[in-house]
Amino acid sequence: MTAPLHETHSAGPGRRLPDTQQGMRRRNLARVMHTVRAEGPLSRAAVASRIGLTRAAVSTLVDELVRTGLLEELGPERPGRVGRPGSALAVSGHGPAGVGAEVGVDHLAACVVDLRGQVRARAVHRGTNRGRSPEPVARELTALIRQVVAEAERQDLWAAGLSVAVPGLIARDGRTVVRAPNLDWNDTDLGALLPPGLPLTVDNEANFGGLAELWLGEDTPRDFLHVSAEIGIGAAVVVDGRLLRGTRGFAGELGHVPVEPDGPACPCGGRGCLEQYAGEEAVLRAAGLEPGEGRVGLLATRAAAGDEEVRRALRDAGKALGVALTGAVNLLDPRSVVLGGALSALAPWLLPSLQAELASRTAGAACPVSVSRLGPEGPLLGAAHAVVRSVLDDPASVAEHA
């Protein structure tokens, strides 16, 4: 399963378990991998300089990573450097890769990302999953996963793990969907329905979207609130570069924050939830349009053409988002709010009323709001990159199980 970067384990308050020689080696292998991934191609000497180890120590680590196929040597560094040129190192474009998958209300998707962060295979199936039992959905998702894994294997890649994004509450075991109101799933052990043999993590789609923003976004701060807005609305709270999960792992259910206590009923059992005002289907209803594939694009086209009914629906949705976000911003004081998901394509018409609500309701200076460049791809990319990060964080374990 994927694990947070550089997580420490405590033997008690203020006490850390003693480091072992094996543990130090594993951490140093990870430091080399992260450094080459972030700044490469680099020579052994350059890696040693950046992580503060001797050249001899780094050379031993690099030899191990090259031998196991995680790093590759590109040949002598560019000419013009003083002294004997070293061999440039880069993260391998072959070997272990991350498999990400997504269960959406209106689609299924899977992709493979290599250690360099490049998408090497991708497959999507369109069609509603609302009200379908988990078994046939899992079978279709499994077919997509096998399709992209087979395509990746033809490119000399192998699956190091699988992460699946789901629009719902996920148990701490990382495999059970406790509740997904927009799918009508409850207490579903998704791990039992997916292909065996791969390390598996199931998580909320907004969490994976937030992690994708943290890892792939441009100039993203380490403290922010990521809003994944489409048919459902979720949020990921990132504090100091880590997800804030809550006691049960359910933190971030922004879509079920009530904005009108006596508003319409919501599938979650509450009334007046944000999703009933700013979710994709709610916006379509307010604009006088029927749900269907490509509806967000149609909303954008009509809004750009000056359709006042559509623009009014989007202004109202932005206002509802602003009201719900006000409470989160006042409570958490994030550096910024990032709007992702399918509705990020409607930002030009959502943001003015959203920002106006935040400005008038938040204590102190208004929290800046930006739009994710990842859009609806965020959860799927975040899932695949979560596996990649687990490889970079502990390359020794991958080599042992390759």
Image (cartoon, grey):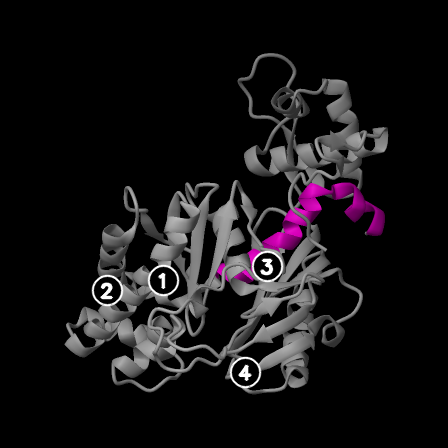
Q: Residue 148, image x and y in percent?
A: 64, 67
User: Tag on residue 129?
Assistant: 4
Mark 4 and mark 2: span between their CA atoms?
29 Å
Mark sitting earlier along the chain (4/2): 4
In the rendered structure, does residue 212 fall within the stretch colored magenta? no
Mark 1 and mark 2: span between their CA atoms?
18 Å
Mark sitting earlier along the chain (1/4): 4
Front-most of residues 342 and 67: 342
Mark 1 and mark 3: span between their CA atoms?
26 Å
In the rendered structure, which amino acid carries the disc numbered 3?
Ala
Residue drawn at (38%, 70%) of the image: 274
Q: Are marks 4 and 3 in contact (CB under 8 Å)?
A: no
Residue tagged by mark 1?
324
In the rendered structure, which amino acid carries the disc numbered 4?
Asn
In the rendered structure, which amino acid carries the disc numbered 1?
Ala
Q: Are marks 1 and 2 in contact (CB under 8 Å)?
A: no
Q: Are marks 3 and 2 in contact (CB under 8 Å)?
A: no
How busy is the neighbourhood of tag 3: few (under 14 within 10 Å), some, or many (20 plus)? many
In the image, residue 9 sits, relative to residue 348, either above or below, namely above
Residue tagged by mark 2?
349
Secondary structure at badge 2 equals helix
User: Tag on residue 383?
Assistant: 3
Q: Residue 209, image x and y in percent?
A: 50, 58
> What predominant SS class does the magenta segment belong to?
helix
Mark sitting earlier along the chain (3/2): 2
Secondary structure at badge 4 equals loop
How busy is the neighbourhood of tag 1: few (under 14 within 10 Å), some, or many (20 plus)? many
Mark 4 and mark 3: span between their CA atoms?
20 Å
Q: Quadrant of residue 146?
A: bottom right
Mark sitting earlier along the chain (1/2): 1
How busy is the neighbourhood of tag 2: few (under 14 within 10 Å), some, or many (20 plus)? many
